[in-house]
Image (cartoon, rainbow, N blue to C red):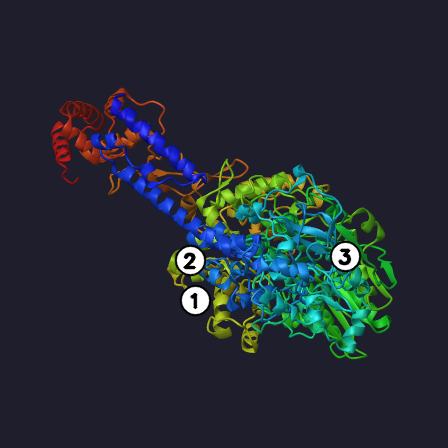
Amino acid sequence: MGKRQRDRKKASREENEKRRRLEAGATPCSEETFSVPPKEAKKKKMGSQKKKRVAKAREKAAKFAEREGLFEELRKTAASAEELEVLRASVAAETHSSTAARRARAALLRERSGIGLDDRERDALYKRSLGTKRVSQEEPPAAAKRMLEATPKRASSRSSSGVPSGAKQRSSTPPPPPPSPPRKGVLENAASPRAVVLPPGKPSTLELGKRAKEGARVLARMWDGTVVRGVVSLSFADGFCDVRTSTSSLESVAPGDLWLDDQPAEKDRPPRSAAELVMKELEQLKTTIAAAATRNGGGGGGGGDREEEAAQPAQDCGWKNDGKKKYVPKPLALPSTRSPTTHAAPVEAPKTKARRVARSAEIQAARMELPACGMEQEIVEAIGSQEDVVVISGETGSGKSTQVPQFLYEAGYGRVVATQPRRVAAVTTARRVALELGAVIPRPGGGASIVGYRTRFEEGGVGEVTKIVLETDGVLLQEMRRDLLLRDYEAVIVDEAHERSLNTDVLLGLLSRAVPLRRETNGIAPLKLVIMSASGLEDVVSHEGLWRGARPRTLEIPGRQHPVAIHFARETRLDDYVAAASEQTRRLHETEPPGGILVFLTGKREVETLASRLRATYSTTAVVVVALHASLSLAQQEVAFAAVPEGIRKIVVATNVAETSVTIPGISCVVDAGRVKRRVASGGGGALVLEVGWISKASAQQRAGRAGRDGPGRVYRLYTPAVLADVCPDVDPPDVAVLPLEDLVLNAKALGVVDLGTFPFITPPPRAALRDAELSLARVGALKLPTAKLSRLGRALATLPVGLRSSAALHAAAPKDRALCAALAAAVSEKSPFGNKIAPPPPRFRHPLGDAHSRLSALLAYAREAGGGGGGGGVGATAWCESNGLDAAALERADKARRAVARTAARRFGGGLLAVDAPTPAQDLRLAKALAAAYLDRLARRADPAAVEDYLERRRRQRRKPSEEKKPTRYDRECAYELLSPPTGERFAYLSAGSALYSRSRRDLPEWIAYTDLSAGDYDDRLVVRAATALDGAWILRLAGPFVSLGVPVDAPGPACDDDDRIIASFLPSLETPDGREWDLPLARAPLDDHAPALRQVAVARLLLERCCEPADSIASLLPFRASHRPNKVARLLDILKHNKPGGGGLRHLRATIQADSIFAGNLRKALARCCVSSLSSSSEALDRAWSAFVRGDPP
């Protein structure tokens, strides 16, 4: 290292050292300190970087000197240490306007002390303290110059002896009193430039001698002299804290009137909050009561100020006029320091004033009969306690579903959401709550109300004024996907949790994590969770993985059940239980006293059948027969809950929708068939199988309870006690154990859940069900195997909240077909509008591509009748449906689903998707292909009759009495479809008799179909596919992706070259099934894979032979693709092509190689002559002409 470099490094070190001292707060150096030594200047001038550093240091020194001079002026004018600190902070905020911490510190000090506030800022502080305006820290709080002008020049009042005049006054007169504490929400003195505000219902700032630990118990004296217990909710770095009491969410207490039960050790101090980190410079600041009293009238002031303050009335300044002037110290109310970006804390949300509801005497009398109203105080106190989770159990009919939301509304909570597992329960509960509150009854498309509801594709009454929202659990689950913390709500009620639906289980798992997160998140009030059930929910309460801390608090509402007599049947009819229910209902109508009769059956078809029979039987008598199931419209459902005139008997035929959640008035007798229709997973492919099975013992008890709501009742069970004891399970299995889990796995993967085994399920899902769900997602293309990670398509599907199948179809559709695809997805997601299951759709709507397109035709026609594609239904649309044999309620729901899917898809893809026209034949094919992309795991092919006969014969022999089993018919053998993902114990299925593709002739059936669901046969034990769509086998080759194997090319048709010089060969591809089988797909032409060089050489050799010789069938026999060894005369040709590596191209690439390499051309010509002349009997002259033409590139 030379001398020049050493000198340069030495100068650099000295300069860095001086800069570090300057930044550390040392006395700034003079300008000569940074000047270059004369000797060095003569040797070399300063560089540009060094000049910049020197200029920057000079500028910094000048600013520091200017600020020190200004601070010295502030020391002369400040009346107290607190005022000096405020002025210094304001100056720092002005000179360092880019530092957010300095601005925040200055704003905080000025707000606490009230120094230097003009009228505008004082009014803003007052409004903010009343909660009408939040603190904003976007601009610096004040200018230093205005602060100096607003501060009185107290230095001029000093005497020549150096003793302040205020000190002389204090020696001769009693100390003037401090200002009296202001009343809540009222300015202390409007004329004072330093008025102090105590906002009502807002937190106060308390001064402590030591830092208080969050959660410490304290005793605080209130303004009226009472002492209350409280808990420190937030501790600041400068010794201040906020206190929460039991009488109010946040009570205002006086500084100093605070006693701590204990002082935390330093190691127990909670970690620094965001507010502490932002204002770390406040650690040295000590704002004391004495300093505040000095500023307001105790020290440093002139006599004029003291006299003006003494002229205030005695009651306003803390003096007692009892003969002596006696000073009574009163606490000073400092304004709140809480703001959105500083002292935010996870404290209880300040509740609004308790709401009063004026109800009619009739409604109030009906409410008072409910057991839940007798426990209103206990329920509200439990929910409002420190425990965020409360479990309430009570029998159906106790009033918990309608009353608990009203309790929270009247207690002053903000928006409350309550979930129901069924759409009917959500709508009817919302309307009943609105009626009892005297609010507008929520209706679809109506105005906003205090009470609203949301279902999957419909909402009513929801708006800005809504305080109670009734939703289905799936809707709230979609809201949690957008906002896990549910910031729009203060309380969540999960009703009917004992039913253990899949959405309810997932909701409880997510809420168990969201509730503690809400309490830990700054600036958000805690979330209250209320779980309601007809049973005790011991499995939920005691679940250790669900609740990490203490168990939830439990409450039990006593029932009001009247005595119910239970009658069992002498024998159980296993098949015709509908006829047994009809006979029992007729006997009850003839023998029982007046009162309603409720009949429980399994599904819509059975309910409508029995209701029609009863209407025909009692058409002229005083009987009202009502059907109740989930497929009915809202207007039709309301008929079941309406009162009937005296002397009229109401007979309600219902599914299990009337079992829980809703109470039908006036029921005295129940007829229980003991069956229920369940949707269970088929064991593969995610398809659902509708099965009719026995109810559980818990459901039997619930059904019996329907008869004892209004008085003593009777229940007639159409089965024996032995069936109930031995066959019926204790409880219904939770949905997570029996339903497909594709949507659950997709949403969990999108949220980042790697292993669903760690999710806090009440009942863990079966591992086999999770594997089936992952395989189904992989076949659709949403998941990558074997890593089980989301693909790009999977992430896109998760962002479109319309369901896995609808989302996949929309992504697969062409942009111009998405409006029709939204309608198609809605049509297959709802029930069929063709009510007759044993007859195909009407010819007007029957489509050759299958059931999905037939439903689409009916839906588009209904949309045109209902209002030009805008939907809405109406009397005209209903009459049109009846005239065309269509289900108006099903089409109304499908049209609502279409509009909802279209609006959601429009936000994702853009464009208007509501207006649709009838599809063209080309669009029909594209829609069928998009539907196939969404149901690639639910495919079926026309089965081989011999395989079907062998399978059915083996199954028949395995039965207990094979001789009594029917032998397979011709239809059974020839019209069966083999399922790609068969359910357990089944392999073949059939088209439904009501399908648009149904035929009893094999040649009229499509080769390939896709379906949406499976179900048991209408009149036999055959497995039936629903919503079948005819497919082209070539579509599966392009859509199935990694599950399709091309295999080895076939010899005929032979290979060819396309326009891009790729070698195209013929294949017989196969589709891999989940159980390891392979399905042959139609013949396909595809490029040869680059990973099969041997096959490429065979293809190039065959193309060359066909090009240079007359095409002959013997070429395929000479060079077959599947041969294990070939003759030597052909092997020479393949060897030359192998070693010269013609690459990934075809004949054009080979021609270029021949023209570039003469040796390769000669060897190839000889090998070709050996093959052609000796094997194909071609003359040498013909070969020469063909070879020359090939080398020149002449067309063949």
Q: Which x, y percent locates residue 289?
A: 65, 55
Q: In the rendered structure, which disc, 1 or 2, sits on the residue that comes first in sequence?
A: 2
Q: How many C-alpha atoms fall within 10 Å of the one at disc 2: few (<14), some, or many (≥20)?
A: some
Whether residue 713 is visible: yes
The amino acid at mark 2 is Phe
Q: How many C-alpha atoms fall within 10 Å of the one at disc 3: few (<14), some, or many (≥20)?
A: some
- Is 32 placed left or right of 163 in the picture? left
Give SS at disc 3: strand
**Which residue is disc 3 drawn over?**
228
**Which residue is disc 2 drawn over?**
909
**Picture quadrant of residue 8:** top left
Say which quadrant the N terminus sits in: top left
Q: In the rendered structure, which disc, 1 or 3, sits on the residue that comes first in sequence?
A: 3
Residue closest to the eye, 394 or 1040: 394
**Picture quadrant of residue 1037:** top left
Give SS at disc 2: helix
- Is 486 placed left or right of 428 in the picture? left
- Is 905 placed left or right of 377 in the picture? left
**Which residue is disc 1 drawn over?**
916
Residue closest to the eye, 474 or 1074: 474
